[in-house]
């Protein structure tokens, strides 16, 4: 008689699996799904824990601030919270202090320059020893050019403010010889002297000299410059 053959369930002829082996395979296939669920739950728990950790740290930092009064470091806090003084404001204050320090000596100089004791006919001493009064002449002429009565009055005011000696110096341009210019300069000084005497100035108070073409006040290279050099200067010699 022939033996009955078992069914070949796994396709392997001649290999017969025992019942214990079949039971073991069934048990392993049933454990795979729970293991996967456990892994997924663990990952979800870790992810939630990471998300919930941020507000917990923030709350702890706020509690630290309230308890200690120390704020966390930030770059903006350096710009707004600290009572820093602007550099430009410090420079302005320094500039104002320097200006105040320099203004005091300048004001003192201005006060010292002011006349304090009037002399003569109420005129300050500073106006007596001022620049000389100038009278001009035409070319090769000793007749003074007094354009108006106001100019004559101004010349007489200078003479009347002087209480001692008046000096009149005559000048010429560079045209002509030295000797001619010296005589012409003296003639111009004498002409101004005569005008002063006509207005009551004593002859003892007047001195006349000639400088000829020396000490020009303008260039003799131009006609306008030579016209300015044909002059006589009236100066008070009061000390």
Image (cartoon, grey):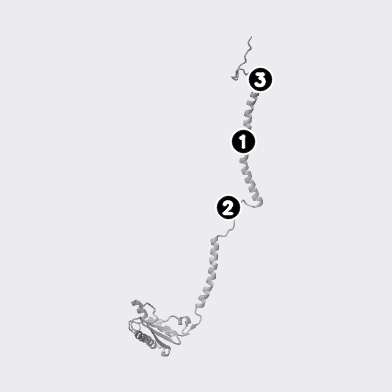
- Reading the image, the residue beneath label 3 is 19
- Give the alpha-carbon distance from disc 3 to disc 2, as whole Å: 75 Å
Is 24 rendered above or below residue 39? above
Q: Give the label on residue 43, or none.
A: 1
Q: Nearer the viewer, residue 26 or 238?
A: 26
Can I make out residue 146 in this image? Answer: no
Quarter residue 8 falls in: top right
Viewer-side label of 3, 2: 3
- Neighbor class of circle 2 (other Cα within 10 Å; few <14, some 14-19, many 20+) is few
- Neighbor class of circle 3 (other Cα within 10 Å; few <14, some 14-19, many 20+) is few
Quick check: marks 3 and 2 in contact, CB under 8 Å?
A: no
- Reading the image, the residue beneath label 2 is 75
From the viewer's perspective, tell me whether residue 147 is left or right of residue 8. Answer: left
Label 1 residue SS: helix
Give coordinates of residue 116: x percent, y percent.
51, 80
Label 3 residue SS: helix
Label 2 residue SS: helix
Give coordinates of residue 6: x percent, y percent.
62, 15
- Give the alpha-carbon distance from disc 1 to disc 2, as whole Å: 38 Å
Q: Residue at x 63, y 42 (%)?
A: 53
Is 146 rendered above or below residue 88? below
Q: Residue at x 66, y 52 (%)?
A: 68
Earlier in the chain: of badge 3 and badge 2, it is 3
Quarter residue 86 falls in: bottom right
Give coordinates of residue 10: x percent, y percent.
60, 20
């Amino acid at each position: 008689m022939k033996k009955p053959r078992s069914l070949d369930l796994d396709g392997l002829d001649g290999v017969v699996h025992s019942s214990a082996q079949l039971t073991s395979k069934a048990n392993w296939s049933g454990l795979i799904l729970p293991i996967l669920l456990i892994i997924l739950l663990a990952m979800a728990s870790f992810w939630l824990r990471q998300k919930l950790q941020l507000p917990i740290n923030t709350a702890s930092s706020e509690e630290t601030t309230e308890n200690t009064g120390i704020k966390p470091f930030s770059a903006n806090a350096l710009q707004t919270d600290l009572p820093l003084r602007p550099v430009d404001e410090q420079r302005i204050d320094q500039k104002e202090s320097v200006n105040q320090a320099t203004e005091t000596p300048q004001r003192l100089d201005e006060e010292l320059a002011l006349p304090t004791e009037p002399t003569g006919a109420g005129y300050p001493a500073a106006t007596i020893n001022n620049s000389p009064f100038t009278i001009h002449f035409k070319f090769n002429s000793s007749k003074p050019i007094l354009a108006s009565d106001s100019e004559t009055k101004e010349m007489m005011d200078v003479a009347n403010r002087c209480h001692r000696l008046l000096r009149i110096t005559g000048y010429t341009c560079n045209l002509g010889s030295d000797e001619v210019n010296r005589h012409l300069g003296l003639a111009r000084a004498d002409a101004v002297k005569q005008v002063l005497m006509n207005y009551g100035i004593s002859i003892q108070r007047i001195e006349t000299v000639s400088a000829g073409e020396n000490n020009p006040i303008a260039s003799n290279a131009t006609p306008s410059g030579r016209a300015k050099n044909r002059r006589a200067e009236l100066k008070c010699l009061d000390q």
